[in-house]
Amino acid sequence: MSKILIIESDFTKGNILGELLQLQGHEVTVAADENLLLPTAIQWLAKLPSPANGREPSVQVDPPAIPPSPAQPKPAMAGTFLAKLHGRKFLVKLSEVKVILAQGEFSEVVWGDQNERIKFRKPLKVWIKELANPPFIRVHRQAIINLHFLDYVSRNEAGKSQVHLQNFPRVLEVSQRKIAGLNRALKNWGKLF
């Protein structure tokens, strides 16, 4: 009997894989890690060797087909996320998040009246796929803003667009590539209210 450890970002999917392997006579342990970025492939189940005792599983299981990932849109992130700060764990409402800033391979989330900050090991391209658009929109390769906290958009001396957020001291530059998307989002944002 072979021992197999499954580490999956989705605990339910890991349990399903574990049940399929147990039906084939393998000893399985399932663990979940929400920081995994690559999904586990299922096709390898059919290629697993049969158990050492030589008996056939009582139920024949065909591995399910995996649909192509681009065809399935990812659901928007839930209304809260878990934050760990100063030894405390608490939920932060996405409606309170003002801005998410890139800092190397990390991202810094800023929320609340006190501009509380926390770092995540998650790039902005992952955040933007998970967050609802609108109100979250990427205005620069280093910033995602929440339109709920937008105070105004201006131009600096060089003619570049800048975003000013409510109760946030830093002025964020809007990149040339993102100006059209910001304008489109602002026009559609006004139609939502």
Image (spheres, rainbow, N blue to C red):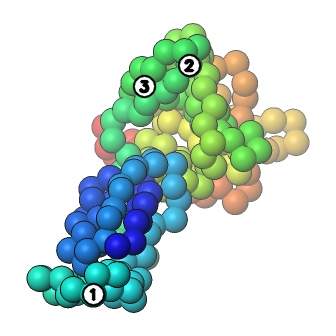
Dot 1 lies on which element? loop
Q: Earlier in the sequence, mark 2 or mark 3?
A: 2
Q: Does 30 appear above or below 79? A: below
Q: Classify residue 102 as left or right of residue 116.
A: right
Looking at the rendered structure, the kind of residue marked 3 is Val
Q: Amino acid at mark 2?
A: Leu
Q: Which mark is residue 85?
A: 2
In terms of depth relative to the viewer, which is nearer, 154 or 86? 86
- Front-most of 10 and 122? 10
**In this rendering, is residue 130 above or below 84?**
below
Q: Is residue 141 visible?
A: yes
Residue lying at 63% horizontally and 49% vertically, measured from the top left = 123
In the displayed structure, would residue 46 be above or below residue 25?
A: below
Q: For mark 1, what is the residue? A: 54
Q: Which mark is residue 92?
A: 3
**Which quadrant would residue 119 be assigned to in this image?**
top right
Q: Looking at the picture, how far across and down is residue 158, in whole percent?
A: 88, 42
Q: Is residue 67 left or right of residue 113?
A: left
Give the percent coordinates (x, y) of residue 76: 36, 51
Q: Nearer the viewer, mark 1 or mark 3?
A: 1
